Amino acid sequence: MRDRARAMRREPTLAERRLWSRIKAGQLGGMRFRRQVPLGPYIADFACFDPKVVIECDGDQHAGNAYDEIRDAWLQAQGFRVIRLWNVDVLENLDGVGETILLRLGRR
């Protein structure tokens, strides 16, 4: 699992790269995110452990995906809030995405 996470960190999608530029190093509300984090049987695109938040950048293939629902339920059972963002939103409105994340976490 760790090897796969490392490989995913080396080859992020364009949306993941853009979002990382906005949330790394505590730039978003002081939260410290990590990229491609193994959590149980899954790898989260981005995870923060204080507060417990997982952010996923999703393309069209994730629309109505039953696997994602199972995954989100498992992450929520571990105490994580899951925020799913569409790649197109990250690419076209990065500032708005940052505000959305803060609003969903009650930080704005």
Image: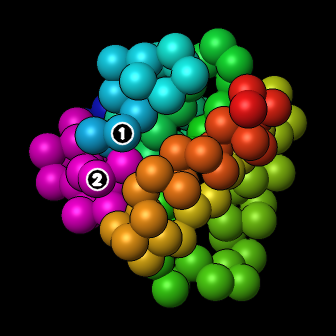
Q: In which quadrant of the rendered image does the N terminus lie?
A: top left
Residue assigned mark 2? 18
Give residue 10's position: percent from left, percent from top: 14, 45
* Picture mark count: 2
Q: Is residue 107 above or below residue 31?
A: below
**What is the C-alpha distance between the residues marked 2 and 1?**
7 Å
Specify whether residue 15 is painted magenta.
Answer: yes
What residue is at 16 percent from the left and 54 percent from the top?
A: 11
In the figure, is residue 69 to the left or right of 1? right
Give residue 33's position: percent from left, percent from top: 45, 25
What residue is at 44 percent from the left and 65 percent from the top?
A: 93
Q: Label 2: few (<14), some or many (≥20) within 10 Å?
A: some
CB within 8 Å, label 2 to label 1: yes
In the image shown, does 80 or 101 lie closer to the viewer?
101
In the image shown, does 101 or 46 lie closer to the viewer?
101
Q: Which residue type carries mark 1?
A: Arg
What residue is at 34 percent from the left and 28 percent from the top?
A: 24
Residue assigned mark 1? 22
* Residue interval drawn in magenta: 4-19
Q: Is residue 100 above or below residue 92?
A: above
